[in-house]
Amino acid sequence: MTYPSDRPVLLVDALNVFMRHFVANPTMSDQGHHAGGIVGFLKSIRYLVDQIHPSEVCIIWEGGGSSRRRTIFKDYKSGRRPQKLNRFYGDDIPDTVENKNYQVSKCIEFLKLVPVKQIYVSDCEADDVIGYLVKNRYRDRRCVIASSDRDYYQLLSSKTIQWSPGQKKFITVGEVIRKFNIHPVNFCVARCFCGDGSDAIPGIKGAGFKTLVKRFPELSSSECITVDEILTLSEQRAVGSKIKLYHNINDNQDVVRRNWRLMYLDITNLSASQIQKIDSIIDTFELSRNKIKLMRSLMQEGLLTFDADAFFMTLNTVPKSG
């Protein structure tokens, strides 16, 4: 079977996808170890490759967090709830963190044997890397982002869509507009007012998506509106108005501007050396197609029921070069 020359690039927010399976998939290896993260993650990659027939597959791993964001806001991601442990086994997993790290290392090891590119850049986040790739490296290409994170909604366009493993569907520009009545080009602006509890980023009191778009219908437009333009509109609409949201916004303009610096995905939170490393990995990464070693490695790990042959055959449809 042949596919169009504009086959999309698949960009996987690796830890986001992995963790969904790690906390929920009860698979055990034949050696008696929890292996749900490995099995679920690899199956997800196979499913996506089978569905979208990508020209390239880039697996982007977290690089230890963004020091630039922590400099902007010291409480960034502070007090984040720990991932729920896999509860299928009660106390049978003595060290879940150690088990998680072990499974991640095995995923990386197995993926080195199939034609995917793995990207790890220290001191930055996967969403910064993906934002750079979509807006710069692959700006003229079709892209599919695999993640359940809403941070990526701001990147959606006629060329870029998102696969949500939680919702088990593709998220498009139209889907975001239907759900939030906010166009993706303005989604980051809206989030600057609403905040992000998962990253401990406070917003403006009383600002939810529905309330915000009711007071600022401009967010629904496909025309890009800036944070400063919304702040100006808020000042204008607050005159003679008893609506608290306007006044709350006017009293906390610095919070909104700070949130933009934290939430906007571009090159602003990447250093020149980090960008250089991303480009270097993309340009020089040597794809592997070692089926025998993959099957042996999976057997050694006790994953005898995992269909290594089908996994390899699916991944082998990725072209020799993107």
Image (tube, rainbow, N blue to C red):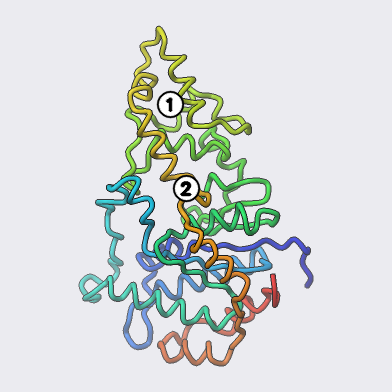
- In this view, which residue lies farthest toward the top? 240
- Neighbor class of circle 2 (other Cα within 10 Å; few <14, some 14-19, many 20+) is some
Q: Is residue 18 above or below residue 285?
A: above
Compared across the picture, whether 104 is left or right of 44 comes to left
Residue at horizontal 41 percent and vertical 66 percent from the top = 122
Where residue 11 sits, quadrant-wise, is bottom right
Residue at 51% of width from left, 69% of height from top?
119
Q: Is residue 250 above or below residue 321?
A: above
Tell me the element at label 1.
helix
Mark 1, Cα crowd under 10 Å, few <14 / some 14-19 / many 20+, is: few
Is the N terminus in the top left, top right, bottom left or bottom right quadrant?
bottom right
The quadrant of the picture occupied by the C terminus is: bottom right
Q: Which tag, 1 or 2, sits closer to the chain's start?
A: 2
Residue 91: percent from the left, percent from the top? 20, 72
> Which residue of the protein is positioned furthest toward the front in this rendering?
272
Q: Which residue is mark 1?
A: 211
Helix, strand, or loop for circle 2?
helix
135 and 271: which one is in front?
Answer: 271
What's under tag 2, amino acid-wise? Arg
Q: Which x, y percent locates residue 2?
A: 79, 70
Q: Which residue is mark 2?
A: 150
The residue that appears at 61% across and 78% down in the rendered structure is: 115
Residue 50 at x, y = what percent? 64, 69
Residue nearest the observer in this picture, 246 or 132: 132
For residue 55, above or below residue 295: above
- How many angstroms separate mark 1 from mark 2 (CA)? 19 Å
Q: Amino acid at mark 1?
A: Thr
Front-most of residues 140 and 30 = 140
Q: Position of residue 46 (x, y in %)?
A: 57, 72
Vertical relation: 195 (above or below) 46? above
